Amino acid sequence: MTAERSYTVRDLPLSDRPRERLQRLGAEALSTAELLAIIMGSGTHGDSVLMTSQKLLSEFGNLQNIAQATVAEMSTVRGIGKAKALQIKAALELANRLGDPDYRSGEPVQSPQEAIKSVQSKLKGKKKEHFYMLCLDTRNRVNNTNQVSVGNLDSSIVHPREVFKDAISAYASTVIFVHNHPSGDLEPSSEDINLTKRLVEAGELLGIPVLDHIIVSDRGFTSLKSRNLI
């Protein structure tokens, strides 16, 4: 039995091959579908890799939705198996880290604006609450960022014991907590305030002070410390 052939960008006319177009014109000249095609490398029997990437974009609507999709969700698109989905996830995460100060030498954190820089890109457009802990060294520089929990649309479940276990492992001198409100409402809820008090108390017992708890949304941010809630 003849094995099914995997169609690659080399099956396209030379002038239409994304790799050659990138080399000749630069990455900026390529469409999103072409860039995805280069990442995936090969298509499936009957479909070129460019057709597969166009199907992926058609299914999810835009690149942001693809970035938020799970590997399993991407794999439902014909021609996108687990391996290709993982390649895409890895490429998009690298792009995400380009604008993330957490992945390069940072300056000391001196304001809430500086604190949220290391997680802002991770929280943008999220439809669930994501709770992060920033671990700071003795010079107030972020040396580690941990995702503590992912909650539903209304709340996140955070256990002080698990939170500070990670802070101890990261040799944190101090910590800052950041979580998003998908609704856009920046007003701290009673759960936010109560959780912050528990975390502050736990930090005091362990000698790892909580510097701030910041709520962010696409509209801006609110610092609980600036509101005298810490």
Image: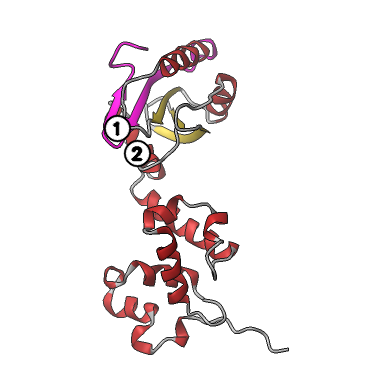
Dot 1, how many residues are within 10 Å of its Cα: few (below 14), some (14-19), or many (20+)?
A: few
Q: How many marks?
A: 2
Stretch of the chain drawn in magenta: 203-230
> In the figure, residue 16 lies in which quadrant?
bottom left
Q: Inspect this view and state whether residue 108 appears.
A: no
Residue 111 position, x and y percent, is 28, 26
Asked if 221 appears above or below 34 in the picture, the reply is above
Q: Is residue 228 left or right of residue 205?
A: left
Q: Which residue is mark 2?
A: 120
Q: Quadrant of the N terminus?
A: bottom right
- Membership of 97 in magenta stretch: no
Tell me how far mark 2 sits from mark 1, CA to CA.
10 Å
Residue 38 position, x and y percent, is 43, 72
Residue 193 position, x and y percent, is 41, 15
Q: Nearer the viewer, residue 162 or 52?
A: 52
Q: Earlier in the sequence, mark 2 or mark 1?
A: 1
Asked if 78 appears above or below 92 in the picture, the reply is below
Asked if 99 appears above or below 173 in the picture, the reply is below
Asked if 2 appears above or below 65 in the picture, the reply is below
Query: Mark on residue 164?
Result: none
Amino acid beneath label 1 = Glu
Dot 1 lies on which element? helix
Q: Is residue 206 left or right of residue 219?
A: right
Dot 2, how many residues are within 10 Å of its Cα: few (below 14), some (14-19), or many (20+)?
A: some
Image point 54% across, 66% down: which residue? 80
Q: Which residue is mark 1?
A: 114
Amino acid beneath label 2 = Gln
Image point 39% across, 39% down: which residue? 123
Q: Is residue 145 left or right of residue 186?
A: right
Residue 84 position, x and y percent, is 54, 65
